[in-house]
Amino acid sequence: MDYKITGYEPAQLFHFFEEISAIPRGSGNEKGISDFLVAFAKERGLDVYQDEVYNVIIRKPASAGAENAPAVMLQGHIDMVCDKLGSVEHDFTTDGIDLVVKDGVLTANGTTLGADNGIAVALMLTVLDDDSIVHPALECVFTTDEETGLVGAETLDKSQINARTMINLDSEEEGVATVSCAGGVVVTYTCPIVREHKTGSTLTLDISGLLGGHSGSDINLERGNGNLIMARIIDRLMVAGEPAIVSFNGGTKDNAINRECKAVLVYADHAAAEAAAQIAKGIIADVTAELEVFDPGFTCTVEIADDEVEAMDQKSALALIRALRLAPNGVIRRNVATDGSVEVSSNIGVVATSDDQVKIMLSPRSSITSLQNEFKDRLQTLADVLGFDVKFEFEYPGWSYAEHSPVRDVFVESYRELFGSELRIESIHAGLECGLFAEALHGLDAIAVGPTLSDVHTPDESMELASAERFYELLIDVLKRLAA
């Protein structure tokens, strides 16, 4: 293929990234990339394991002289968050990612890039492909369905893994090593809708331009959530004139802060719709001012048209708006005793209305198990009060900080000697697969690292190519030290 990324080393690292970017690999659609990895291993005579959910483990023997060193697991996930701008035509089930290189930064053309966690896949393939690298025995673990709740890592038969040193490659800031993370769960509220035929004037509200972001690592940035802003506008309109809601749809992923939301209301006549439009514009002006610092791109268009529609009855509409106005969103609790880091949060990522049902998806997280359980109890109570059914799915554990970590010590020493500065050690509020592996593999010593990625889970996702170069240098040096 003709490669777009040129002038960076090792060239094979970026070639592999382009090759996997051509393969659709949204969560739940990983067979193609999984089969690609199996073929890669077989072509090179490497031992490979593939399970029924398309997790893959590729094993490579230690380099000469390193046969007695303990085995090392490299790990990352092969799925990606599929999100795009509303104006972009792209089918994530069939289309590869259209990569864009500009000024040393890699992005995609109006879609998520998939560097989270495609760069991990490319890094592992490069290490497996290069026989000149000094390393211990390697177990490269490629997991599926991470973005919907770490499903592949939970399903994987951990007895296939011998290594007790783990390097997770799903961190997003060069110069930072992650050593603990939050646990999480996917919460889905559903409620039936009763519809009524209405004739009148529709009022369409269309929110766009929000920054969005990762519901864990970006939840503390006070960015606007399109679903909540829309609910705020409609709540005010319902107080002022009791419109009927035709539709309310925003977001595609529970773990992405919602960027866009569209709702259609219906009024008895044009005059009532016009009066509501003026109220809505006043709220939009307030929100614009409130988000000026945190989310300056926010816009909301307002349009009126005459139409006949099937609208929700008042009970269904009230249930939807009350749930969105009352469900917790954003930072819930911080660790004020130490660094003020987020301990508990929630994100209302998806609201979707169909002919007969409304669905709301939330992504609560906590680094403390008891607080996560208490928060789930709150969400259950809210569902009971408002008449929603609720499901708690895809729950995964947090990953606790280890006082003693040899692999952490090696990374700190290597980073200092290579780059002349100190590696920053931190905990994150996002979820990582390390917790699932640590829970299953007694004595596992783990660390999460990676090059600099920005705006993951959004169409603005990017990767600094020079950062990927430097990170590869660090990884190879660490493997050499672990082989000694």
Image: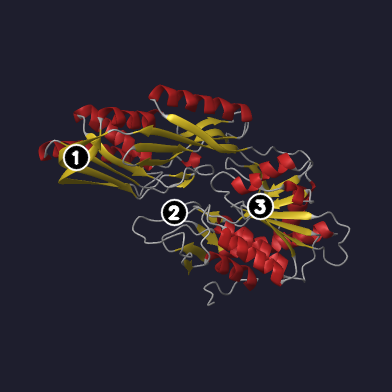
| Residue 292 quadrant | top left
Q: Which mark is residue 88?
A: none
Quarter of the image where the C terminus is located: bottom right
Q: Report the residue marked by disc 2.
A: 83
Label 3: element kind: loop
Residue at figure coordinates x 70%, y 44% from the top left? 437
**Amino acid on which disc 1 is placed:** Ala
The relative height of residue 181 versus residue 174 in the rendered view (above or below) is above
Residue 432: x and y, percent? Answer: 62, 45
Residue 164: x and y, percent? Answer: 79, 48
Residue 25: x and y, percent? Answer: 53, 59
Residue 69: x and y, percent? Answer: 86, 56
CA–CA distance between discs 1 and 2?
30 Å
Task: Answer with mark 1 or mark 2, whichever residue precedes in sequence.
Answer: 2
Q: Which mark is residue 449?
A: 3
**Amino acid on which disc 2 is placed:** Asp
Residue at figure coordinates x 32%, y 34% from the top left? 193
